[in-house]
Image (cartoon, rainbow, N blue to C red):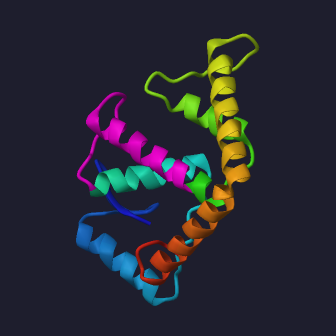
Amino acid sequence: MPITHTSQGWFWGSKGPFTTREKALEVQQAAFASGYQEKQMSEEPHNIFAQATIQAKEEGHTHFKKNSPGYKRRNEIASDLMHRKWEDKQVDSPYAVATWRTKTMKEPYADFTENSPGRKKRDDIAEAIKRDQEIKKSSGLFNITGFLQKQANEILKKRGFLQK
């Protein structure tokens, strides 16, 4: 859990407030020393945004109001995390990928009801994904690419560049 600062004081996750950052660190270290283990974040969309927010904060962004630099950077990071998730799992549903892409476009779509612009855009993207998958499958690239990606991820995990 990250150590954060609010108007109430310092927090380690939901524990706090503490008067100093050092006290929050002390509580964190005591918890780990007594056997506490952090749960791995799941890759649900809300947790991907939480991961992206943490990463944006590590890059120095502190404000995430709509259209602020922090907001834009967090969304870029979340987009990258989602793409990596889908590449790793080779998602079979082009419509799931397309829906997410249309929701995260520069000018996002929220309405996917029949005959809406959002639905048309989503369907266009899904069809393009299907065509791309068919081309990759017919050329053998789909299986080779997936295999190489998994091998690269395993090497990066073993060397400590990715979380296990």
Q: Which residues are magenta?
A: 59-84
Residue at position x 46%, y 49% in the image: 80
Q: How many numbered markers are drawn?
A: 0
Q: Nearer the viewer, residue 137 or 108?
A: 137
> With 11 as the anchor, is 95 left or right in this view?
right
Question: Is residue 67 within the magenta segment?
Answer: yes
The quarter holding residue 9 reads: bottom left
The quarter holding residue 16 reads: bottom left
List x then y, in percent, for residue 150: 59, 70
Q: Quadrant of the C terminus?
A: bottom right
Q: Nearer the viewer, residue 154 or 44?
A: 154
Viewer can see residue 111: no
Residue at position x 56%, y 30% in the image: 103
Residue at position x 56%, y 74% in the image: 151
Question: Is residue 139 within the magenta segment?
Answer: no
> With 53 as the anchor, is 130 left or right in this view?
right
List x then y, in percent, for residue 142: 66, 56
Q: Quadrant of the N terminus?
A: bottom left
Residue at position x 37%, y 77% in the image: 27
Q: Is residue 151 above or below residue 137?
A: below
Q: Is residue 164 above or below residue 72?
A: below
List x then y, in percent, for residue 159: 42, 83
Look at the magenta stretch and give its main secondary structure: helix
List x then y, in percent, for residue 76: 40, 42
> With 98 as the anchor, is 50 left or right in this view?
left
Q: Nearer the viewer, residue 134 or 149?
A: 134
Viewer can see residue 105: yes
